[in-house]
Image (tube, rainbow, N blue to C red):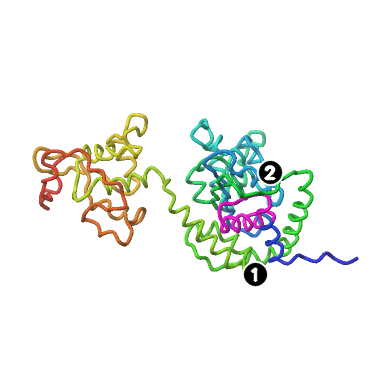
Amino acid sequence: MTEPTAPNGTTILDQLHDTLTRYVVLPSPEATDAVTLWIAATHAVPAWAYAPRLVIRAPEKRCGKSRLLDVVEATCRNPLITVNASTAAVYRSIGTDDPPTILLDEADTVFGPKAGEGNEDLRGLLNAGHQRNRYTIRWDHARNRLERIPTFAMAALAGIGAMPDTIEDRAVIVRMRRRAPGENVAPYRQRRDGPALKHLADSLDLWLRANLARLERAEPDMPLEDRAADTWEPLIAVADLAGGEWPDRGRHAAETLTAERDGDSASSDRIQLLTDCRAAFGEHSALPTSALIERLKADPEAPWADYGGTGLTAMRLGTLLREYGITSQNIRFGPPHGQAKGYRRDDFTDAWHRYCPAPAAVVAEHTAPVRHLRTVPGPQLPGLDEMPPPPAENAAGTA
């Protein structure tokens, strides 16, 4: 009896790519290539040190995200799809050396603005499971001993709007959109189309499982750095294994989708606060805490007027900035402020450089307000705008 021949990698990825575009209109060729490589990577989980998440998000209903998840389910390895599983059940499902691929539909009901509280355990699982050997520790009362529960597994989430930033930071993000007139797809019927997609999944499995040792040793040249490189490495390793045009296409997709993610206007509250503080400082070398808060809250597009339900306070401001080593000081201002708690611009420059650098065309720090930011003039406090830089010997007052 003749042994089955392992499929050619280039051919199998081309077939998977064609299958995706048959049933779904994806937002770009790079997104289609990324999803193709992500699905393929689920068939080689034992080879990976990192398990990238796939985030399928859309601004509205009827953008094809659930249909894309249907095709992912039909072609990935050992899918486990759920809408509202308990965290404990997901933990128990993962607990194997060759875990299932977790597929979470309607993820906005779990993590979105209308979701209830109590989902931090699931978010923690999805964050920890991005990297191998990040266990959850539980006490087993029945056996009276500690239990280490694995978290490592590939996972895809589909929903309306953005997922938590800690998840998206570990994800390949595909931004779906509603089909335009003239963009047509074939209807998907699981009973009719499922067998062909199952055959495609079997071909992927046959090819990639035969190359696990090679994939585990792979150290592909990455066009990205840090966590983005960790997230995309399995996909690039699959592309390199396939050969043909796929190595170049995979790297181009990685650069393009990562740039889209980095250019997303959504950011953590702390990053937005740093950015807005730069606009609020303008040309000032120091601002009283009260003046900085008023300037931040004056921007109608920023969240600070209603932050925490009652607006940004000095205590909340200090808590957010303390993570960057920025703290308020006693500073001697000109009349009528005198000595007051405030912040120095110099204390922000390192954080601005590291977390929200200005474009190269913008003049260096300590000049006019950067132009790509919202300029928030804020209230014109008497004496503040005319205040000369405090002399060095008066930089700090007494407590």
- Please tell me which residue is depicted at 71% across the width and 45% down the height of the picture: 187
Q: Position of residue 27 (x, y in %)?
A: 56, 52
Please say if 81 is above or below 367. above
Q: Position of residue 164 (x, y in %)?
A: 49, 42
Q: Quadrant of the N terminus?
A: bottom right
Per the picture, the main secondary structure of the magenta-coloured stretch is: helix
Q: Quadrant of the C terminus?
A: top left
Read off the magenta span: 19-41
- Furthest toward the left, the residue is 335
211 vs 140, nearest the viewer:
211
- Please tell me which residue is depicted at 60% across the width and 59% down the height of the picture: 33
The amino acid at mark 1 is Gly
Q: What residue would you read off at disc 1?
A: 243
SS state under label 2? strand
**In the picture provided, is 341 more to the left or to the right than 306?**
left
360 vs 133, nearest the viewer:
360
Please say if 227 is above or below 108. below
Q: Residues within 10 Å of mark 1 (few under 14, many from 20)?
A: some
- Is residue 86 covered in magenta? no
Q: What residue would you read off at disc 2?
A: 80
SS state under label 1? loop
- Is residue 30 covered in magenta? yes
**Quadrant of the rendered image containing residue 309:** top left
